[in-house]
Image (tube, grey):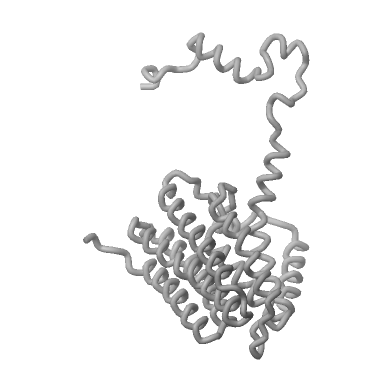
């Protein structure tokens, strides 16, 4: 077997450990700590990719190992938490919990398998479908926010309405993971922007300071906003980029070039031999 890179795979092992620890905490009834551990696994999953890119130590082994760790931490662990909350704590139907858990874990596995197959074809600035760490982060942060504002898990207080809301939240997240909607890569979002006026720094500082008063809801809002960015951007692109047939052209242009003047001009240029051939490029 070929030698493997140690440092990025150590972060991946830490991610896998967070998933196993979260499931153990769920079995003991510590749901909020389990949700925090899942968020910690998300940070480690981000770190292993950054370290691998900075050291130029990306490998096929690391890609497959990272996908297996993601399936445990961001697929099985959140569903174990929601299943136990719904069935054991709230007394819900076990068939509903089982169906919800299988659907979400299957969507996570399909999302990771598709990413491994298309890893060399997709653009690095975008993801095809919602990444599984962000879907699990949305569920974990939602559990923490419900604990903070509605008392979920405090002294054994788990209402059926709360678990039903959590189950309903898994359906759109699972659909977004297996969809073909485009999501911006986190590395692109964290890229240092150009120079801005000083007032922007003051406004960002005030927003971050205000978020500290309701940090649980702010974290969930960030994950929910990223999950909703895919459908919103798709609608915006569909509205902004209208088909070429709907453009208003002058009747003389339509009579001379048709409704697609640029495309027809290029075809005529190729016919005349204006474009260099492959042999001429040599």
Using the image as rendered, state which of residue 131 and residue 106 is in the foreground: 106
Which residue lies at the image location 44% right of the left edge and 77% below the top edge? Answer: 20
Considering the image in quadrants, where does the N terminus appear?
Answer: bottom left
Q: Name, please, the residue furthest toward the bottom.
A: 155
Quarter assignment of residue 202: bottom right
Using the image as rendered, state which of residue 88 and residue 77 is in the foreground: 88
Which residue lies at the image location 65% right of the left edge and 74% below the top edge? Answer: 163
Whole-percent x, y for residue 208 in the image: 71, 71
> How many numbered marks appear?
0
Using the image as rendered, state which of residue 38 and residue 195 is in the foreground: 38
Considering the image in quadrants, where does the C terminus appear?
Answer: top left
Left or right of 8, for residue 153: right
Whole-percent x, y for residue 254 in the image: 72, 14
Whole-percent x, y for residue 158 in the image: 66, 82
Q: Name, please, the residue furthest toward the left.
A: 1
Left or right of 235, for residue 34: left
Which residue lies at the image location 70% right of the left edge and 24% below the top edge? Answer: 245
Using the image as rendered, state which of residue 282 and residue 130 is in the foreground: 130
Left or right of 107, for residue 265: right
Which residue lies at the image location 63% right of the left edge and 51% below the top edge? Answer: 230
Q: In the rendered view, tell whether residue 246 sits above or below residue 118.
A: above
Whole-percent x, y for residue 102 in the image: 50, 64
């Amino acid at each position: 077997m070929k030698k493997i890179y140690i440092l990025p795979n150590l972060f991946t092992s830490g991610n896998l450990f967070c998933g196993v620890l979260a499931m153990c905490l769920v079995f003991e009834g510590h749901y909020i700590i389990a949700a925090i551990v899942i968020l910690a696994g998300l940070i480690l999953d981000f770190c292993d990719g950054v370290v691998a890119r900075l050291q130029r130590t990306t490998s096929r082994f690391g890609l497959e190992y990272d996908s297996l760790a993601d399936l445990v931490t961001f697929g099985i662990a959140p569903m174990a938490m929601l299943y136990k909350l719904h069935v054991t704590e709230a007394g819900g139907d076990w068939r509903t919990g089982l169906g919800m858990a299988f659907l979400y874990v299957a969507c996570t596995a399909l999302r990771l398998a598709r990413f491994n197959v298309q890893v060399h074809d997709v653009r690095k600035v975008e993801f095809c479908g919602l990444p599984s760490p962000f879907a699990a982060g949305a569920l974990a942060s939602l559990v923490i926010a419900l604990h903070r504002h509605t008392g979920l898990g405090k002294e054994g207080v788990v209402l059926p309405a709360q678990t039903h809301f959590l189950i309903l939240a898994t359906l759109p997240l699972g659909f977004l993971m297996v969809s073909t909607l485009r999501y911006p890569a986190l590395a692109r979002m964290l890229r240092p922007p150009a120079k801005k006026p000083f007032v922007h720094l003051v406004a960002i500082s005030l927003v971050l300071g205000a978020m500290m008063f309701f940090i649980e809801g702010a974290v969930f809002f960030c994950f929910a906003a990223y999950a909703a960015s895919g459908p919103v951007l798709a609608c915006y692109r569909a509205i902004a980029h209208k088909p070429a047939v709907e453009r208003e052209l002058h009747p003389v242009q339509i009579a001379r070039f048709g409704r697609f003047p640029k495309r027809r001009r290029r075809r005529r240029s190729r016919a005349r031999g204006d474009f260099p051939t492959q042999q001429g490029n040599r």
